[in-house]
């Protein structure tokens, strides 16, 4: 004889399996949501860090004097004979301006360092949270 298609044990087992599948689906959905939020946090932190570093670079380029190779020496010519009289050297910047630039650069680099450390700690926390969640997702055997 063939076994009955719908016995009480198979219906109960089917219901139990559907409940377990729903629980796993809910856990996976919550993990996806947490991954999205963490990715958003990391992306925002990365964007801020990149912006600070790029801004620091631009400020440094703007404040730093031009290279010695690119400094143009101005030659003064005599109006009558058209012969060179003197060569004017570009002005050197004062020590006050260079020290102010140094302080500004130190401040901006410190901000960038803090943002980088914050992003690294967020990534470590997300890795630890993922490891804990993966340990909780192991299927139970009966």
Image (tube, grey):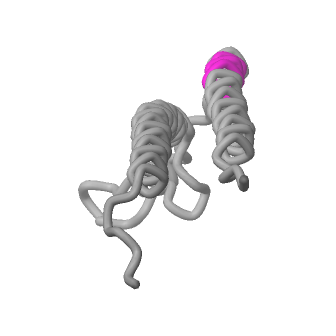
In the image, the segment drawn in magenta is 99-109
Asked whether the viewer can see residue 110, the reply is yes
Tell me where residue 70 appears, x and y as whole percent: 50, 60
Q: Quadrant of residue 67?
A: bottom right
The front one of 5 and 33 is 5
Q: Is residue 106 magenta?
A: yes
Please indicate whether residue 92 sits to the left or right of residue 54 in the image.
right
Please indicate whether residue 121 sits to the left or right of residue 115 in the image.
right
Is residue 21 depicted above or below 56 in this figure? below
Residue at 64 percent of width and 31 percent of height: 122
Principal secondary structure, stretch drawn in magenta: helix
Residue at 38 percent of width and 82 percent of height: 2
Is residue 25 depicted above or below 121 in this figure? below
Asked whether the viewer can see residue 35, the reply is no
Residue at 40 percent of width and 84 percent of height: 1
The front one of 51 and 44 is 44
Query: Seen from this angle, which residue lies furthest bottom?
Result: 1
Q: Quadrant of residue 98?
A: top right
């Amino acid at each position: 004889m063939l076994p009955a298609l719908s016995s009480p044990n198979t219906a109960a087992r089917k219901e139990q399996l559907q409940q377990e599948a729903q629980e796993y689906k809910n856990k996976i959905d919550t993990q996806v949501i947490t991954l999205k939020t963490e990715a958003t946090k990391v992306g925002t932190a990365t964007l801020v860090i990149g912006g600070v570093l790029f801004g620091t670079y631009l400020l440094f380029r703007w404040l730093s004097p031009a290279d010695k190779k690119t400094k143009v020496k101005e030659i003064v010519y005599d109006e009558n004979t058209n012969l060179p009289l003197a060569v004017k050297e570009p002005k050197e910047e004062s020590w006050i301006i260079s020290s102010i630039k140094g302080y500004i650069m130190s401040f901006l680099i410190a901000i960038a360092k803090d943002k980088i450390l914050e992003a690294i700690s967020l990534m470590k926390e997300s890795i630890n949270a993922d490891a804990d969640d993966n340990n909780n997702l192991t299927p139970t055997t009966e």
